[in-house]
Image (cartoon, rainbow, N blue to C red):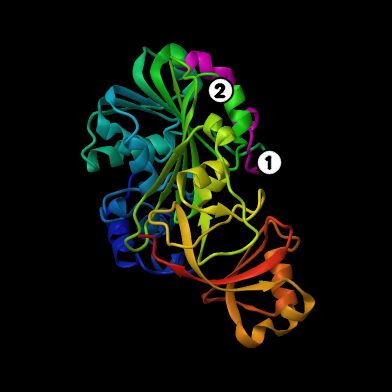
Amino acid sequence: MMQISPETQLFIREHSSDDVRVLALQAKKYPDIDMPTAITQIAGRKVAAEKIPSWWEIEKIWYPKHLSLEQCSSEITARYKARLLQGDSLTDLTGGFGIDCSFLATGFKSATYVERQEELCEIAAHNFPVLNLNHINIKNEDGVTYLQAMSPVDCLFFDPARRNEHGGKTVAISDCEPNVAELEELLLQKANRVMIKLSPMLDLSLALKELKQTQEVHILSVNNECKELLILLGQTSPTEISIHCVNLSTKGTQEEQHFVFTREQEQCSECTYTDSLETYLYEPNASLLKAGAFRSIAAAYPVRKLHPNSHLYTSDILVAGFPGRSFRVEKVLPFSNKVCKSITQEIPQANITVRNFPMSVDDLRKKTKIQEGGDVYLFATTLSDGGKVLVVCRKVSNI
């Protein structure tokens, strides 16, 4: 049974900002301290400060080894998931560190956390009461074994392992452990609704073909970095599956961006293309790019697309609430050797993005000698007439 002595707890508190690599070398100086445990807790608190801020504020929370902490959800995505599931009873079949379970459980009268690693169960048994989550039962069992024998509940949460036997990350449902597609029928025998958390690298089209009872898809990005793909299964199959593209922000005052479409809408949406840049340029957020809602965006907002494969948009008047980043265009330069040789005289530093362009960001930096960073943004892209251009712009706030 995991225990942390009062002496070690005090050491953790007093050395919470220290470099754990230095502490590891000083273990002999502190013979009464369980140094491996102290280092795990100090390192965990440092990760939690950014990833799980409300837990970081609570000194009594225990943390697991690095891999479990790396794989767990962030607080902001866990809170989003909690908005999607409510009911009387919940079972989390892949408990892990317990982030998702703890936030999901707030919407249920009773919850069960299932985890096959004994150490993680001990940590959860300590943390849940500290968080006033006394209605969560803990089961130290294999998730699939527990699923086969369990009584039905309102909702199930399932986060299959996304690392193969060699430690590499997997991107296909069939490569996950266990294979969710093979368990779909059993999952829906045990719950009315099932939430499955998958890798953002997963092929969405393939996933929807394999999971026949999909009702909704939620693609979650945090600060414009795609983090999670959530699939909600239910007892009925809708004629059209709603795909929610969400960008959550932990920085500044930027509001949550939320765009919903269906694949059928995407196919029949009208999209206007242009061979010239207007006053403003728009880059869809990472969730929209992952979902492939390219025509749907052009139909929903008064913007024109630069090229079928460029995934950038433009307008003469600033569009309020565009789900992505908005820029004011300062200059459009033709892509040529002459321009590349002289551009640093005017633009020595810029944030470079390439969209439907024959060069990578690194290669373009080498060719232009432009340094990274600053307030200027440079988009290298292709217009609808095939012309290659460099769009110089600055970010504007999304109103």
Q: In this view, does 278 lie above or below 372?
A: above
Q: In this view, does 143 lie above or below 373?
A: above
Of callouts 1 and 2, the N-terminal one = 1
Query: Which picture quadrant has residue 43?
Result: bottom left
Q: In this view, does 388 lie above or below 231?
A: below
Q: Residue at x 40, y 54 (%)?
A: 44
Q: Which residue is drawn at 51% across and 13% down?
A: 185
Neighbours of disc 2 within 10 Å: few (<14), some (14-19), many (20+): some
Q: Residue 198 carries which label?
A: none
Q: Which residue is drawn at 35% across and 32% down?
A: 84
Depth order, front residue of 34/138 = 138
Q: Which amino acid does label 1 sit on?
A: His
Single out the mark in the foreground, 1 or 2.
2
Q: In the structure shown, which secondary structural element does the residue marked by tag 1 occupy?
A: loop
Neighbours of disc 1 within 10 Å: few (<14), some (14-19), many (20+): few
**Dot 2 corresponds to which residue?**
211
* Residue 118 x %, y %: 43, 33
